[in-house]
Amino acid sequence: MTAATDLEFAGLTALVTGGGAGIGAATIEALRTRGAATAALDLDPSGAPAGAVQIQVDVTDSAAVQAAVDRAAAELGGIDIVINNAGIGAQGQVEANDDAEWARVLDVNVVSVARVTTAALPHLRRSQAAAVVNTASIASMLGLPERVLYSASKGAVQAMTLAMAADWVAEGIRVNAVVPGTANTPWIGRLLEKAEDPAAERAALNARQPHGRLVEPEEVAEAHCYLASPRNRSTTGVLLPIDGGMTSL
Ligand code: NAD
């Protein structure tokens, strides 16, 4: 049984982009366990935890995002928390991706953060516990090979996080980011499936982590909750690595 003192999100509402799988689905589960009403905005929201409002949307479609955010606000009764988590990968050195691929990945990973947050802003301004949490990546903090476009996109997410935190600190809207290391989600599962020997590749990936294993999505979800929590009202402009020490040890 959950203790009443653990229901720190009771009475609060959260929308999570990319809430249909991986880190986003784990974050919805963690927020719901602590009392939040939640909505999953996703290309395929059917994998969101039971009880979340499922809204099918492509975060690159401005009109559809506005409609999805309006629907989430109507069904949940407002929006206190926005988790900007939808994202896609991109591989390769700088010459690997053409203009169209740059535009596509930046649209999903960067512009959508502005788009979804802007659509939710009138609701955040009415909230007494407004918080935005973005999902960045250690890819923009390390010189990872073959990740130029993806790293650039997540560096932009970090910069936006700090700039939005500065813009809204006086009006009480907090903005923070989690910075996950390589996490054990369907995304990584899909990458491993492409390897000649997926089990060996997974073992090698585990061995490359300072703590010897991938980060679990539930561990990133805990950080999303910490940064979104109304108990942490002095926490803004934070980029919080959840990476087993990859960026610091
Ligand atoms: P995932 O692929 O397992 O899940 C991502 C979800 O986002 C999916 O449900 C997908 O349908 C949704 N999505 C993708 N594009 C969308 C779009 N245009 N509109 C709406 N929904 C869309 O990924 P994940 O590993 O859980 O990653 C979540 C976030 O964490 C991403 O921003 C990713 O960059 C970041 N991240 C992941 C890792 C990792 O190793 N898995 C590491 C660092 C950061």
Image: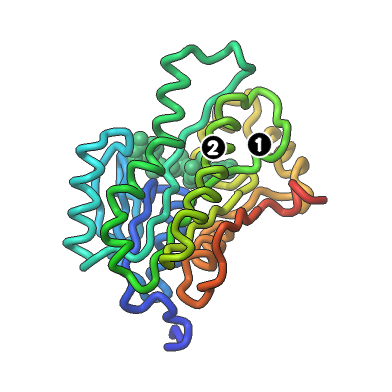
Number of labels in the image equals 2
Query: For this rendering, which residue is in front, 85 or 46?
Result: 85
Could you tell me residue 244's position as x and y percent?
Answer: 72, 54
Question: Considering only vertical position in the picture, is 68 above or below 77?
Answer: above
Query: For this rendering, which residue is in front, 83 or 34?
Result: 83
Question: On the rendered structure, is 106 left or right of 215?
Answer: left
Which residue type does callout 2 highlight? Answer: Ala
For the residue with label 1, is its CB less than 8 Å from the closest atom of ligand 1?
no
Query: For this rendering, which residue is in front, 72 or 4?
Result: 72
According to the picture, the residue beneath numbered tag 1 turns out to be: 199
Could you tell me residue 48's position as x and y percent?
Answer: 34, 54
Q: Nearer the viewer, mark 1 or mark 2?
A: 2
Q: Residue at x 78, y 50 (%)?
A: 248
Which residue type does callout 1 highlight? Answer: Ala
**Label 1 or label 2, whichever comes before in sequence order:** 2
- Residue 218 lies in what quarter of the image? bottom right
User: Mark 2: few, some, or many residues within 10 Å (few <14, many ≥20)?
Assistant: some
Question: Considering only vertical position in the picture, is 160 above or below 107?
Answer: below
Q: Which mark is residue 156?
A: 2
